[in-house]
């Protein structure tokens, strides 16, 4: 048995959840926040048998897309109290960060 932890962007959460339900895969959703952009994420915890890991990874890959997004760089003030203007910059967001962990035992009460 494996535990798949997938951190995805909130925009992809509903569709991924629907696809997992359709494939009869149980998952627990947890709200989370990214460190770089401080944007909303969702972390899925999915416990599956070893033979279904590739199926779950394919579902995640198909439904969690990367996209380009503009963000303003933080404004900084140097020692002379001159500020630098924050120009928007384009960054790649979305997709999924996935961890597959071995599970020693699993219990459902």
Image (cartoon, rainbow, N blue to C red):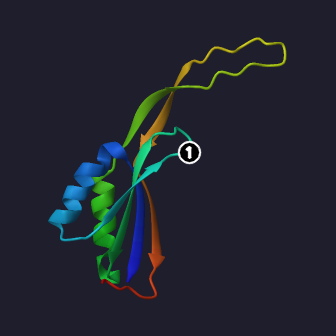
**55 is higher (above) or lower (below) than 81:** below
Q: Residue at x 42, y 34 (%)?
A: 68
Q: Residue furthest front?
A: 109
Task: Give the SS element for disc 1.
Answer: loop
**86 is higher (above) or lower (below) than 93:** above
Q: Quadrant of residue 98?
A: bottom left
**91 is higher (above) or lower (below) than 6:** above
- Residue 79 percent location from the top left of the image: 84, 18
Left or right: 72, with 29 as reference point:
right
Q: Residue furthest right?
A: 79
Q: Residue furthest bottom?
A: 105
- Residue 52 percent location from the top left of the image: 29, 77
Q: Residue at x 26, y 55 (%)?
A: 16
Left or right: 93, with 107 as reference point:
right
Q: Residue furthest left?
A: 22
> Looking at the image, how many numbered discs can be counted on the residues?
1
**Which quarter of the rendering shows the C terminus?**
bottom left
Q: How dense is the environment of label 1, judged by Cα within 10 Å: few (below 14), some, or many (20 and up)? A: few
- Residue 59 percent location from the top left of the image: 27, 61
Between 72 and 109, which is closer to the camera in this rendering? 109
Between 82 and 91, which is closer to the camera in this rendering? 82
Q: Residue at x 23, y 51 (%)?
A: 15
**36 is higher (above) or lower (below) than 18:** above
Q: Quadrant of residue 29?
A: bottom left
Left or right: 21, with 97 as reference point:
left
| Residue to which mark 1 is pinned | 35
Q: Quadrant of residue 77?
A: top right
């Amino acid at each position: 048995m494996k535990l798949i932890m997938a951190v995805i962007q909130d925009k992809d959460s509903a569709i991924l959840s629907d696809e997992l339900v359709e494939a009869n895969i149980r998952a627990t959703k947890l709200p989370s926040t990214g460190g770089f952009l401080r944007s909303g994420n969702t972390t899925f915890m999915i416990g599956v048998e070893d033979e279904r890991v590739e199926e779950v990874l394919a579902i995640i890959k198909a439904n969690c897309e990367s996209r380009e997004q503009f963000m303003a760089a933080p404004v900084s003030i140097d020692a002379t109290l001159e500020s630098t203007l924050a120009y928007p910059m384009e960054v790649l967001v979305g997709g999924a960060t996935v961890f597959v962990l071995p599970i020693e035992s699993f219990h459902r009460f």
